[in-house]
Image (cartoon, grey):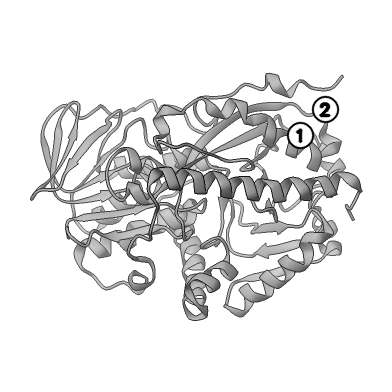
Amino acid sequence: MPIDDSATPFLDISPYVKPPSDLQPALSSNIQADVVIVGGGYTGLSTALALHERGISAVVLERDFCGYGASGRNAGHLTPTICKDLPTAMMLFGRETAARLAGFADFCVESAEQLIQTCGIDCDYNRSGNIMAVIHPAQEKRLRKATQAAVSLGAKMSFIEAGEMRERGVPHAFLCGAMEEAGGTLHTGKFVLGLRKAALARGIRIYEQTAVERVEEAKPIRVITAGGTVSADRIVMASNAYTPEIARPGDHVAPLYITLFETAPLSDVQLDTIGGWRGREGIYTAHESMESYRLTAQRTIIGGSKDVQYFYDCAPHNHGGNGDARKMSVIRAFRERFSTLAEVPIAHAWAGWCGFTLNFMPLVGRASDNPAYHYAVGYNGHGIAQATTMGTLLADLLQGRANPWHELICRKPGYMPSKPLRYLSAKALLALLNGIDRRMDGKVRQGNFSR
């Protein structure tokens, strides 16, 4: 009997995080700090840790609990992807800058790996690399060309032919692909909660259950919450997709709502039917709006990313339950790619917010009119590597220290149209990309192209 996927539970938060037993109290007084950090995810925690190493007092304000947002909800791919991809970076910024961005992307992966090691975090990290996979021969030529262009810029990539895909045991639906050799996959909850544990162990002040109501940019900076105020010499906005609800540079970030799912654990027999997936390489497809899949250490498959949503008001907290209607789209894609797993139940689905920018680059830097105001947001789906690297970059920026990556990454925020035009443009672009993907999926359904 077919499984009723529509009955799959839709969770309010990721299954990979839960409110910690040592939930930190909300801010309930007026306090002072050298630096106030808004947001307790990868960026906020890595920045607090980097500042602590330098003897700088930082306070972290988190609306829910550390890891509640994208840092605990993402699919768990640690990748050296930068911009949309390196060919896009070359088109937007030129060959020389694209080559430097390739080096920065590898540096971000190395920084995340170093942070895992330094903080002693057991997050099921599997240094397997990630594969951009072809699901139909029509995608192959373009992906080969993109891979060659990336390699010419210095990226650590290689093209995996069909035979090697089968030797690796990569699931049969994925015909060939481009391997990003740096990075791999990890347990997102264990990683972000490990950073939280490391911060608390060092005495860093974290106030959870503390929503920021507004930021006053006088001197000193004052961050206002319902229970109290933080006065600080400098501020770091590390609130990613939630920034549009709080302060600048939120008007340059588009929050996109992305739905994910996780299967029940697979048996040995079930793994064999898809090829074995022995290396547990992360996989994302060569769609315009990609699908992502990974085999976890718990032998479950996490997938999602397809069919994202954008809302006119750019206010994530107004749309918390809308992923339930979208879960079937990502689950249907999974059922098509993994047809031999028809009897494997989907254990649960969830969703989260991802901050996107028009040029696919993170927004990092200091406000031109206020040297005390710093930010790092908008990672375009590549936040595990990039956000955890921002700690050191921001700490150097706050101290006025030279950093070789500042000139490359600390850019003036690009143009973002007003909400009416932004909404219409985003919806039109998503419709175009989804239409291209639907046609490609239709071609796959017309024939069996697995090798």
| Closer to us: 207 or 364 | 364
Dot 1 falls on a residue whose secondary structure is loop
- x 47%, y 61%: residue: 359
In the rendered image, which residue does mark 1 sit on? 266
Left or right of 318: which side holds 81?
A: right
| Closer to us: 200 or 48 | 48
- x 51%, y 42%: residue: 188
The x, y position of residue 177, in whole percent, is 74, 61
Left or right of 61: which side holds 221?
A: left
Q: Amino acid at mark 2?
A: Glu
Question: For residue 89, which numbered disc appears in the image?
Answer: none
Dot 2 falls on a residue whose secondary structure is loop
The x, y position of residue 213, in whole percent, is 23, 33
Picture layout, residue 30 above or below residue 442? above
The quadrant of the rendering that contains the N terminus is: top right
Q: Is residue 275 visible?
A: no
Query: Which sits earlier in the primary sequence, circle 1 or circle 2?
Result: 1
Picture quadrant where residue 146 is located: bottom right
In the rendered image, which residue does mark 2 sit on? 343
- x 74%, y 39%: residue: 333
Picture layout, residue 414 above or below residue 417? below
Q: Amino acid at mark 1?
A: Leu
